[in-house]
Amino acid sequence: MSATRRDVLIGAAASLAAGGVARAAQTEWDYASASDLAAALRARRISSVEIVDQTIRRIEAHDGAVNAVVVRDFDRARDAARAADAALARGEEGALLGVPVTVKESFNVAGLPTTWGDPHFRHFTPAEDALAVARLRKAGAVILGKTNVPLWLSDWQSYNSIYGTTNNPWDRRLTPGGSSGGSAAALAAGFGALSLGSDMGGSMRTPAHYCGVLAHRPTLGVAPRRGHAPPGGDATPPETGLAAIGPMARTAADLALALDVIAGPEEAGYRLELPPARRNRLADFRVLVVDAHPLAPTASVVREALASLVQKLARAGAAVSDKAALLPDLAEAARLQARLMSAYWGAGLPRRAYERRFAESDAFSPKDHSLAAERARGAVMSYREWLDADAARMRLRREWRELFKEWDIVMCPAAPTLAFPHDHSTPLEGRRLRIDGKSCPYLDAQLVWATLATTPGLPATVAPIGAANGLPVGAQFIGPYLEDRTPIAFAGALAREFGGFTPPPL
């Protein structure tokens, strides 16, 4: 046993003997980054068995209150940790060799149930890992288990009748977000160094903001989604042109590390080569700030946090502005996203429910361009109409390309509010969100900021930028198409200059 590890364990024992809880001694590993853990494992400062056992003990001690890691695979994790230690002893290498991680419940993991929160699939157990999970394993990661989701991944909260409700580690009365809320809560609580999530309408970005962690939604198609598909059917997911999978972590360096592990084509024949980050020094970045959306309000505490960061960036020497003539029409982009996303969900409806959607669509005036009207139209759009919408998306991507000739980063909110109290009322269409004392349609408010990156398929990183009312505040950093390393590098530069993840007071 190394001197460093021995000192840690002796310190823990001394604290317990004095009547303490040994938390300070264990924090070195509980919130260590995946990069630091991998380095410590290579240096034999700690073994994979020790860090995996420590993480399991932490989950068993704290997850009763959080309910994040709802499918546990601890026996196989310990076996994998022993195998990792043997591999390290042989001098083998792996980017994540021996590092404990979690994955979202919606990813196939061989031998574990994949339900998407639907009781009909409680016993569906795939025989093969999702491709991204297989790549994590190939890099040496130890899979601890799977994290909670909402039913069919269709909410910005994480609850279902199989696994119950996941709570925000900052305040159990509040949601951690969704649909990757279990992953965000697990990271905030110190239940593993990395997690794997998915995102169509902000499903990684919103929980990262609510829980004070980081998430990266890659450029559309950069990380293959095979094995992240509705349960019970083929492992190849339907192509929506909107959905992405990606890493969630507590540091920007870990986002970059995990992205390198999971990204790349499914089959041989071509190779992915993402360009390097445009900048690395904070002072060199050109940042466009967008803090208001034309179709939904944003809470003053969120906008104030962005304004504070703008002042810090300016003092650090970055070029920052809130004016850009080339910024695409945000309202039209949100309407386009509403149609496309609704078309995807509408296609999966039972026949009678789908037929009722035609009457709902016809009830809206042709002059009504509210997001509710666009969702109703999208649910029943024809293939001809879908092609028109897809062409509009490609035009939007070209508009963003022109914008990024002048700017490196577009900085905006990740969501319109801080984490809010659990609200499981139905239907979702009837829910309201309170924003600065005013009532706003839940679906409209939660989608508009996610739209900016989702519709054109751009990379977006969310990272913590401060706190308000005792809760974390994150911001979204959108980068140019295929330049995923640029928003990740910006998040890393922010953390170096101003600080990053802060653990919640569990």
Image (tube, rainbow, N blue to C red):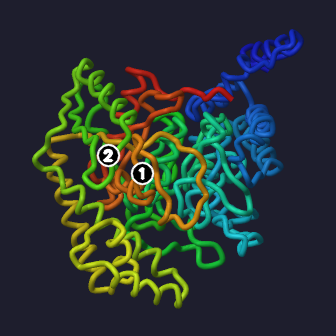
**What residue is pinned by disc 1?**
439
- Which image quarter: residue 54? top right
Quarter of the rendering containing residue 49 = top right
Task: Give the label, 2 or 1, closer to the camera.
Answer: 1
Q: Which residue is mark 2?
A: 478
Comparing 20 with 482, the one in front is: 20
Work out whether 44 lies above or below 187: above
Q: Residues within 10 Å of mark 1 (few under 14, many from 20)?
A: few
Amino acid type at circle 2 is: Ile
Q: Describe the element under mark 1 as helix, strand or loop.
A: strand
User: Residue 451, image x and y in percent?
Assistant: 34, 57
Q: CA distance from mark 2 to mark 1?
A: 28 Å
> Please, which residue is most extreme toward the left here?
325
| Amino acid at dot 1 | Ser
Badge 2 crowding class, 10 Å Cα cut-off, few under 14, some 14 to 19, many 20 or more, is: many
Q: Nearer the N terminus, badge 2 or badge 1?
A: 1
- Helix, strand or loop status at disc 2: strand
